[in-house]
Image (tube, grey):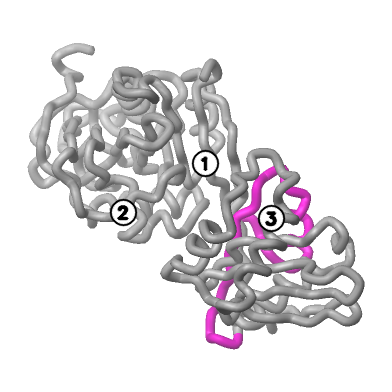
Amino acid sequence: MTAAHKIISDDAALEEGELVTLARRCWEADGGLPLAVEPWFVRSRWSRPGTKTFTVRGPAPGAAAEPGSSPGDATAGGPSSGDAAVSTASSGDAAGRGSSLENAAMGAFSGDAAAGALPAAGDAGGSVLLAAIAVRPGPRGSVVTGLVDPAVRGSGVGSRLLDAALAVAAESEGATAGFVTVETEGLSADAEKLFESRGLRQFFAEEVMRIDLAAAPAPEPTWPAGTTVAEWNGETAERFFQVYATAFRERPGFPDPSAAEWIEETAEDDDFQPERSLLATLPEIGDAGFVSVGDNWIQQVGVVPAARRTGLGGALIREALRRMASAGLHEGWLCVNVDNPAVSLYRRIGFKGVGHRARYRPIDS
């Protein structure tokens, strides 16, 4: 890397507001997880102690070019190669600035699979955050997440930032030294090409789906004959878990938590809604299906094998959506693994895909 393209060391912490603004611009372009633009979400991904960040700054996207500059100086309204400043920072002293939620991170890498030069370092005074990438310690090695403003994509910024982050991850120490996961909450086709060009393979992907509850009446559930429904409470929580375990144990990668672990994780979510989280019982089967809900999110839906293809799963979702609408909510959300056949059910109910989130690891890991 030439002196004109050097990375500047900078101990200044990233401002939460500028990260939120950048995250929103990426989400508006790429779709994906809407929670990724929430301040608490941003804190949990970018403020963990030991996090290393790389940033690119320059004039606000869409700003007028300086007189005498050539059209080639900017990319889609972004900065010229002499305008943007590239810096690194470590947040090793960021303790207490937000909890870390592992194995999930916001991100929208630029669509520039072909490596390009980083914009030259310059005076960052009065500039805005155009791109950032972070490497944070995780339980299974380093975790990489990044954001590149849509206005500067195609300039090589995302490629160089990803390379810098992967180099930091490769130098990590400890039992998980060298292990890395690259995460994105708004996967684009160009980002996918970029990851593949760096020898990364996708090992997890979900489609993010939304239903409009304001445009039409909430869909009414049609229950299998004899169905009884109970809400989540201290007496039914264990029964919810048993249905969860029976419904999901056959799926690859099932985490197999204890009842106490699963119940605590479910109930302690700040957005958990016990009155919208439902357990269905069938006469010939017993406890047969459940849905857990957080605010306006369908968090989990499970039906035991003996009760599948009875319409129970769809009825549980429709009833949860009906209760959301009754509470004044205008939309419902869920995430579904891309290889889960339930995606067709969600589409029939009225959900529409609004993007993907994914995780990548090196092919040889």
Q: Residue at x 29, y 21 (%)?
A: 173
Side of 171 relative to 3 (left or right): right
Identify the residue under disc 1.
187
Residue 160 is at least partly visible in this image:
no
Identify the residue under disc 2.
99
Residue 342 part of the magenta-drawn span: yes
Foreground disc of the pair 2, 3? 3
- Label 1, secondary structure: give it: loop
Q: Range of the magenta residues?
A: 326-354
Question: How far across and down, in percent of the image, does residue 77 sit?
Answer: 31, 41
Between the residue at mark 2 and the residue at mark 3, the CA separation in whole angstroms equals 28 Å
Disc 2 residue type (three-letter): Ser
Give the image quarter of residue 268: bottom left
Side of 302 relative to 159 (left or right): right
Disc 3 residue type (three-letter): Ala
Query: Looking at this view, is 45 or 85 the one in front?
Result: 45
User: Of label 1 and label 2, which has the lower sequence position?
Assistant: 2
Q: Confirm or deny contact between disc 1 and disc 3 (CB under 8 A).
A: no
Q: Is residue 32 above or below residue 107?
A: below
Side of 309 relative to 295 (left or right): right
Give the image quarter of residue 54: top left
Question: How far across and down, in percent of the image, does residue 253 sit?
Answer: 64, 39
